[in-house]
Image: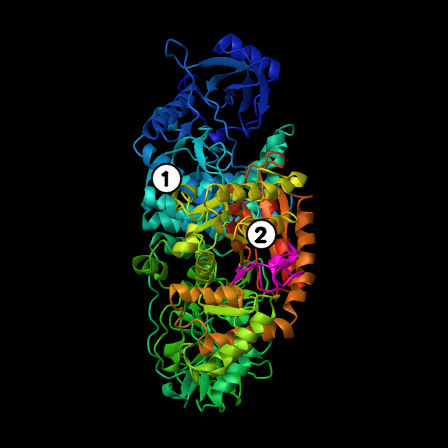
């Protein structure tokens, strides 16, 4: 019998490990009397130890009192404290729950008796911030940070040695098969028990085959969401603290990562592929070997199985342990997620993420082509991808699009049409879905022209045969043919086949699916989700060689497009998202990625008619076939367009300049005002954005677009307060004071001998998220600037063209008429088109500065586009749609405030909305980081939305004006879901 100080635990020698029974009062006496720290004890949950948080009289946290389970010897506790000290010293950027020390340097650790048994009690450093536990969704950033931290711990403990590591724990995955076998009886439900036993057997066999290649070392073995502490205030939550070294032991090094990954699987909205950022981050810090990568997911499954059986056993022997019983449902969810996909799929997915993916063995040319008398040059390829012309005009949403596209291809004369292996099909995606659809083909579909006979490519055996289906061996693989149920194979199950033997007669016009998978692979679905394609496709092979064709290039090969963009495209021209989907198609209010996923577009105010509008496309194509030149030539469209545009504005605005963008329009508008008045000073609103040209940038003071905006304005620009009635200096009813204050500033400029030549502002405050200006604001300011000889310049680039719904122009809401109106964005539905509309008198004064000319502003194509957009806005009643759908959406968004404390306000009108997110509705502290995390989560859920505002805490909601009620409801429902998953619900 070893001395108590030198003994270590052996799980298999223990009947059970109930938590020591210690009351808070007893804990307080122990902490004060034995460890020298008086305080108030609050119980903390634990699986096997007794833990208390000690607080002082003011409630401040002092330390954590940890009373070890009596089954654990003092040597084990010393090893845990030594490992914690080692990690703390090696990584000062990490906070570690190290043992506290007395003034003489001795650890605050003592042998105590609890419930008649001797154990160890000690005081540990308390780490504020809270654990990552709970249902809250874990973002990719959080997941990667968890993996990186685990990698640091693993690398630091690699050479740590201590006799206290020589222990046999139920959590050591080297013993997982024995633990499950011993405790499975505690899983009362037969179906669940059988599932756990089956999964354990399969996973253990995989690990056992690799065990000799798995290095052993000291491992924390519990770097889970329960034991990683978030940096206080971080959002998304970023772990920098480590607690609970109670499972420290020697085990497979890769088990450190496997244990951590398993703890992620119960979180809201989490599924297996979402662990990959942690795998990559761990691998970057502490590289995995090929064997470790191969063992990783089987170890995740084993950890999940151990959690289930151990939790049930602990709840049985320690019924009063609320911590253990509360975890039972969570542990079962971990198991369900760990076994959601076949082991082989997840193993290949991990191999792909860590660079160990191996190219599949090539398919050898067969002795006979699968389709007799169909030559290799008799096949045409049917493209169903996002790039395919067959998907134009919204065809991807129509039932039967694949058959129609195949029929059109067959009309060109080929004997058959085939789809590529491994390609993503846009034809299989719904318009609105919070989960990515299965779009990646694991086989090949054929549409036959003439009738054909399928023959055995080589000698083999029939595995199954029946109406509509035939499966046979094909070398080391299995070939599956699927066809119409009315067609019956010519061979029977179990038949031995010679190469060239007839398999099935396929009638003219038949559709056949071919799939080739590894003989030992699980059943492979015809289509798989893109996130898992790298796991499924290695189990398959391209059947093209069986048809006499060359295999298609791998569809899931490296995509270096973002890297290439960064190499040649100025990086100051940023892109949405850190890991953006590759968008190559749009339709109405949807954007489609090359993975075949459709995203709801909530951000694109550039295309008011919707993406790929047929009338615009046809008009542009028609005009390009005829003429496109500059506006100095004489042609009708430029006249017709400027007449239509001028007619939309009130008198005396009757003269139009055409340019290419909103920046140019504002720049020209300011030049017109300064030239007409001879007064070079300009008054502009703070926190506004007007463009990137010299003049439009000069009057832009948005801190997000230029953090030094206010300090770097030229001397001729003068700013007045942002008239934001929600978060500005004047709020609510007090916002009425903005106008007289602005007027006073304009008057003061004039009194100083510098009267403003122009006042420029958005007519509806876009940078603030669509906040309406206070009633009467523009009337007062316009009057003041005009009184001193200046002009009123209205920036309608974002608000104009019916987006507000209730008004076509933003200035109509203010009941004013500007002197100069700047327009762009919506005018061209994505085509570069802008305009400045003013009076003839002001326009003529420009001649004193020279002449005006824009090479493509007002070109035939631009003019035709402008006309077509105006026609479609009218004919499709898109301004009316902005009222109907916008009001409905605004009501839905307002309702979110009742459920989510982070929702501060809903701004805007029509489909020019902003959802402002705040940490506190009283202080209006902006929820900047939370908004960024929300946008990333919304992308996961199929919605493209982005932040705006000087604090980037407002969701800008400016979708195409064709947005329908179904899409608005999907957006609101998805936003509700994302806010809930991220922990913002009341």
Spot occupied by residue 831 in the image (x, y as percentages of width and height): 47, 70
In this view of the protein, can residue 559 be seen by the observer?
Answer: no
| Secondary structure category for the residue under label 2 | helix
Residue designated by label 2: 782
The secondary element bearing badge 1 is classed as: helix
Identify the colour scheme used: rainbow
Say above or below: 635 vs 600: below
Q: Give the quadrant of residue 587.
A: bottom right
- From the viewer's side, name the closer residue of 126 and 197: 126
Please identify the quadrant where the C terminus is shown: top right
* Residue 571 falls left or right of residue 666: left
Contact check, label 1 and label 2, Cβ < 8 Å: no
Q: CA distance from mark 1 to mark 2?
A: 62 Å
Name the residue: 69% across, 57% down. Answer: 887
Q: Is residue 817 magenta?
A: yes
| Residue in the foreground of this view, choosing between 710 and 632 | 632
Closer to the eye: label 1 or 2:
2
Quadrant occupied by the N terminus: top left
What mark, if any, has residue 758 been given in the picture? none
Q: Position of residue 202 (x, y in %)?
A: 47, 52
Q: Which residue is mark 1?
A: 151
Q: Quadrant of residue 821?
A: bottom right
Residue count near mark 2 (Cα–Cα under 10 Å), binned few <14, some 14–19, many ≥20:
many
Residue 668 location in percent, x, y?
44, 61
Looking at the image, which is closer to me, 294 or 350? 350
In the image, residue 207 above or below residue 493: above
* Residue 551 drawn in magenta: no
Q: Main secondary structure of the magenta part?
A: loop
Q: Which residues are magenta?
A: 797-822
Q: For the image shown, how many numbered marks are present on the structure? A: 2
């Amino acid at each position: 019998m070893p001395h108590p100080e030198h003994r270590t635990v052996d799980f298999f020698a223990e009947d059970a490990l109930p938590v020591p029974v210690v009351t808070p009062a007893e804990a307080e006496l122990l902490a004060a009397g034995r460890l020298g720290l008086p305080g108030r004890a609050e119980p903390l949950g634990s699986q096997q130890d007794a833990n208390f948080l000690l607080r002082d009289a003011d409630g401040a946290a002092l330390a954590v009192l940890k009373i070890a389970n009596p089954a654990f010897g003092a040597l084990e506790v010393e090893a845990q404290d030594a490992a914690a000290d080692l990690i703390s010293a090696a990584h000062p950027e990490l906070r570690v729950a190290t043992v506290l020390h007395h003034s003489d340097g001795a650890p605050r650790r003592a042998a105590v008796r609890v419930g008649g048994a001797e154990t160890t009690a000690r005081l540990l450093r308390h780490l504020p911030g809270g654990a990552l536990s709970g249902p809250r969704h874990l973002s990719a950033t959080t997941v990667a940070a968890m993996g990186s931290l685990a990698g640091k711990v693993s690398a630091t403990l690699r050479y740590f040695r201590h006799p206290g590591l020589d222990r046999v724990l139920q959590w050591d995955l080297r013993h997982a098969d024995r633990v499950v076998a011993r405790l499975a009886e505690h899983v009362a439900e037969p179906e669940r028990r059988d599932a756990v036993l089956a999964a354990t057997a399969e996973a253990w066999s995989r690990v056992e085959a690799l065990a000799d290649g798995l290095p052993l070392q000291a491992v924390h073995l519990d770097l889970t969401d329960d034991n990683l502490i978030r940096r206080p205030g971080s959002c998304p939550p970023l772990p920098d603290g480590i607690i609970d070294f109670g499972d420290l032991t020697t085990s497979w090094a890769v088990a450190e990562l496997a244990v951590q990954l398993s703890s992620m699987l119960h979180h809201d909205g989490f599924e297996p592929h979402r662990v990959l950022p942690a795998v990559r981050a761990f691998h970057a810090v502490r590289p995995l070997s090929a064997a470790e990568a191969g063992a990783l997911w089987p170890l995740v499954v084993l950890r999940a199985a151990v959690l289930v059986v151990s939790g049930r056993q602990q709840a049985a022997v320690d019924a009063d342990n609320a911590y253990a019983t509360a975890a039972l449902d969570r542990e079962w969810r971990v198991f369900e997620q760990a076994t959601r996909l076949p082991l082989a799929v997840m193993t290949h997915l991990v191999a792909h993420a860590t660079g160990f993916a191996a190219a599949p063995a090539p398919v050898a040319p067969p002795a006979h082509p699968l389709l007799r008398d169909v030559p290799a040059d008799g096949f045409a390829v049917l493209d169903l991808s996002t790039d395919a012309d067959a998907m134009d005009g919204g065809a991807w949403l129509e039932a039967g699009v694949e058959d129609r596209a195949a029929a059109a291809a067959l009309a060109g004369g080929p004997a058959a049409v085939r789809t590529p292996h491994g390609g993503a099909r846009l034809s299989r995606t719904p318009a609105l879905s919070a989960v990515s659809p299965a779009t990646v083909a694991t086989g090949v579909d054929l549409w036959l022209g003439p009738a054909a006979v399928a023959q055995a490519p080589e000698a083999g055996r029939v595995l199954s045969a029946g109406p509509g289906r035939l499966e046979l061996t094909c070398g080391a693989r299995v070939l599956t043919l699927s066809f119409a149920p009315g067609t019956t194979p010519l061979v029977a199950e179990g038949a031995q086949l010679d190469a060239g033997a007839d398999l099935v007669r396929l009638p003219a016009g038949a559709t056949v699916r071919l799939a080739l998978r590894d003989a030992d692979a699980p059943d492979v679905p015809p289509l798989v989700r893109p996130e898992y394609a790298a796991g499924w496709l290695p189990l398959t092979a391209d059947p093209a060689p069986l048809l006499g064709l060359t295999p298609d290039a791998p569809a899931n090969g490296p995509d270096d497009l973002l890297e290439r963009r960064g190499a040649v495209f100025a990086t100051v021209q940023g892109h949405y998202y850190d890991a953006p989907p590759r968008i190559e198609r749009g339709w109405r209010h949807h954007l489609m990625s090359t993975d075949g996923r459709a995203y709801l577009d909530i951000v694109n105010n550039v295309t008011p008619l919707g993406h790929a509008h047929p009338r615009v496309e046809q008009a542009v194509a028609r005009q390009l076939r005829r003429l496109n030149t500059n506006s100095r030539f004489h042609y009708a469209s430029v006249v017709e367009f400027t007449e239509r545009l001028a007619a939309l504005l009130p008198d005396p605005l009757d003269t139009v300049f055409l340019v290419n963008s909103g920046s140019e329009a504002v720049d020209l508008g300011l030049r017109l005002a300064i030239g007409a008045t001879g007064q070079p000073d300009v008054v502009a609103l703070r926190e506004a954005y007007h463009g990137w040209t010299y003049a439009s940038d000069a009057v832009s003071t948005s801190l997000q677009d230029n953090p030094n905006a206010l300090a770097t304005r030229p001397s001729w620009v003068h700013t007045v307060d942002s008239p934001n009635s929600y978060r500005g200096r004047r709020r609510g009813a007090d916002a009425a004071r903005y106008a007289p204050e602005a007027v006073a500033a304009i008057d003061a400029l004039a009194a100083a001998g510098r009267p403003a030549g122009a006042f420029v502002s958005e007519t509806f405050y876009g940078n603030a998220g669509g906040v309406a200006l206070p009633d009467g604001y523009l009337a007062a300011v316009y009057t003041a600037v005009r009184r001193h000889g200046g002009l009123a310049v209205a920036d309608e680039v974002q608000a104009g063209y019916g987006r507000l719904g209730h008004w076509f122009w933003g200035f109509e809401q203010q009941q004013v008429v500007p002197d100069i109106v700047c327009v762009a964005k919506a005018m061209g539905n994505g085509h570069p088109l802008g305009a400045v509309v003013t009076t003839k008198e002001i326009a003529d004064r420009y001649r004193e500065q020279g002449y005006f000319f824009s090479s493509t502003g007002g070109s035939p194509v631009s003019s035709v586009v402008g006309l077509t957009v105006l026609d479609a806005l009218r004919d499709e009643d898109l301004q009316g749609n902005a009222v109907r759908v916008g009001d409905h959406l605004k009501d839905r968004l307002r309702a979110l405030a009742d459920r989510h404390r982070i929702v501060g306000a809903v701004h805007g009108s029509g489909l020019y909305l902003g959802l402002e997110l705040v940490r506190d509705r009283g202080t209006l502290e902006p929820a900047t980081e939370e908004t960024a995390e929300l946008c990333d989560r919304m992308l996961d859920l199929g919605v493209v939305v982005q932040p705006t505002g000087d604090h980037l805490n407002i969701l800008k909601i400016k979708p195409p004006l064709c947005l329908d009620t179904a899409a608005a409801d999907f957006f609101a429902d998805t936003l509700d879901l994302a806010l809930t998953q991220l922990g913002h619900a009341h």
